[in-house]
Image (spheres, rainbow, N blue to C red):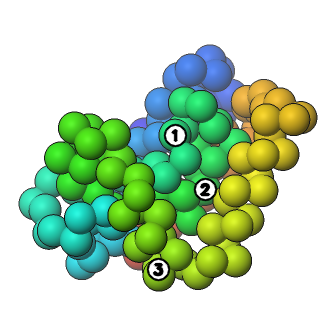
Amino acid sequence: MATKNNLKKKTLSQLKAIAVTHFHKYIRNRDNLDPCISCGQYTAQPHASHFYSAGQNPVLKFDPLNVHKSCLRCNYFLAGNLIPYRQNLIKKIGLEQVKKLDFKVALSKQTGFKWDRFFLIEIIEKYKAINKLEYPN
């Protein structure tokens, strides 16, 4: 994969794509033994599903509290299956953490959000290192 110097030469779009690869791998590994957050079924092909849409809420795109293992059916065909997702998210991370996610979204709607190269490089390095140390396969 790219070294830190090579990352500095990448565009924002390229950095986002690399960050997504490492972050989603982390989520799938972290939640490996968990069922789908929405329907409770176990799946052989897990997805990293965002409770708050990453496209509409980029501030939470790389927030591990916002992203959990999901099955293809819930993530794609049921658009996240968000009602049971929220219920199970509260059980998993607690109501206070969910309220913090709600607040971050509301705040970002008022203040806006802009991608930062250094933030994306930090995300890449962080999750690349975690994956290497904790999930070497």
* Tag 3 residue: 92
* Tag 2 residue: 63
Q: Is residue 36 above or below residue 57?
A: below
Mark 2 vs 3, N-terminal side: 2
Quadrant of res 116: top right
Q: Nearer the viewer, mark 2 or mark 1?
A: 1
The three-letter amino acid code for the residue at tag 2 is Asp
Secondary element at tag 3: helix
Quadrant of res 31: bottom left
Q: Nearer the viewer, mark 2 or mark 3?
A: 3
Between 129 and 52, the one nearer to me in the picture: 52
The three-letter amino acid code for the residue at tag 3 is Lys
Question: Which residue is located at x 41 percent, y 58 percent?
Answer: 83
The three-letter amino acid code for the residue at tag 1 is Ser
Which disc is residue 53 wearing? 1
Secondary element at tag 1: loop
Where does residue 58 sit, x and y in percent of width and height? 64, 37
State the separation of the CA atoms marked 2 and 1: 11 Å
Which disc is residue 14 wearing? none
